[in-house]
């Protein structure tokens, strides 16, 4: 099962074993007719930051939708983990154990192949301007130029394990990574670690910044933690 709330907080998308994406009006609770097209159960959903695109991933394909017009835009190869850029123009999908592809979300044209990863990706995220793609794979966190597929740098000191999460701050300068019992904040341009948040019970499975970048939310195996930047 998968679920995502739209950036404006008005719609929730749900999906699962029935291979359909369903959009719900949060104000009225009304369910809209399902979006059909997947050939296998859906494992992951994600809205673009502007809310104009919705990506849904099964084990073999990723479909991009226009959630307003309720129309299918593209179908590309790949699976989760995946990520759609804030502007909805670029889509990154996992092709195999060592490869990530970057696609044009509107046409489905393949732009870049990122190959020879140390292991199957566990999480990935575009920067706010979609020029950089951060990928967690194996025990490495690497920043890639999403336009040409060139490795920019590895985040020295990243401690990866079988649990991993990643999030980009809206300011485009900060990256958060999560693993077992810790969250690290990194400077995106230099790769320097800025801060480590410890005393977290359980593995971090998901991270997300608030729209203003002031708060960071972490979902763990034991609950939810929220940090707010001091003013």
Image (cartoon, grey):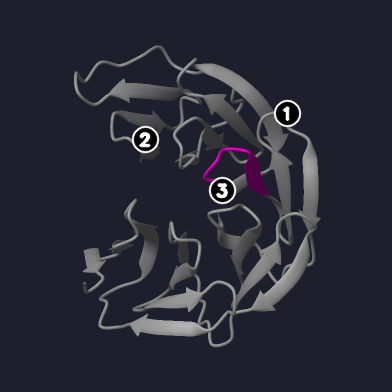
Rendered residue at 45%/19% (across/down): 68
Rendered residue at 29%/65% (across/down): 221
Going by the image, does 36 lie left or right of 115?
left
Of callouts 1 and 2, which one flags the residue occurring earlier in the amino acid sequence? 2
Which residue, given by chain and number where applicable, does mark 3 sit on? 83
For the C terminus, give its image quadrant. Answer: bottom left
Which residue, given by chain and number where applicable, does mark 2 sit on? 6
Q: Residue 107's mark?
A: 1
- What secondary structure is found at the residue carrying circle 2? loop
Q: Relative to the observer, which residue lies in front, 128 or 222?
A: 128
Q: Give the range drawn in magenta.
A: 83-93
Disc 3 residue crowd, few under 14, some 14–19, many 20+, Cα 10 Å: many
Image spot of residue 215 (x, y percent):
28, 62
Image spot of residue 65 (x, y percent):
55, 26
Spatial CA distance of label 3 from label 2 is 15 Å
Q: Foreground mark, 1 or 3?
A: 1
Image spot of residue 14 (x, y percent):
38, 31
């Amino acid at each position: 099962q998968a679920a995502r709330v739209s950036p404006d907080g008005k719609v929730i998308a749900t999906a699962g074993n029935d291979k359909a994406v369903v959009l719900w009006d949060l104000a009225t609770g009304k369910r809209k007719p399902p979006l059909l097209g997947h050939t296998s159960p859906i494992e992951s959903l994600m809205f673009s930051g502007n809310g104009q695109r919705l990506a849904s991933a099964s084990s073999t394909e990723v479909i991009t939708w226009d959630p307003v017009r309720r129309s299918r835009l593209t179908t590309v190869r790949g699976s989760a983990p995946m990520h759609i850029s804030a502007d909805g123009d670029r889509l990154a999908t996992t092709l195999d154990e060592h490869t990530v592809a970057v696609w044009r979300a509107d046409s489905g044209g393949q732009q870049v192949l990122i190959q020879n990863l140390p292991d199957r990706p566990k999480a990935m995220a575009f920067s706010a301007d979609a020029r950089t793609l951060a990928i967690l794979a194996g025990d490495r966190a690497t920043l890639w130029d999403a336009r040409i597929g060139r490795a920019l740098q590895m985040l020295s000191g990243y401690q990866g394990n079988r649990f991993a999460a990643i999030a980009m701050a809206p300011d485009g300068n900060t990256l958060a990574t999560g693993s077992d019992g810790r969250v690290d904040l990194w400077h995106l341009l230099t790769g320097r670690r800025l801060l480590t948040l410890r005393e977290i019970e359980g593995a971090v499975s998901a991270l997300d910044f608030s729209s203003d970048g002031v708060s960071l939310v972490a979902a763990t195996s034991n609950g939810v933690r929220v940090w707010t930047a001091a003013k």
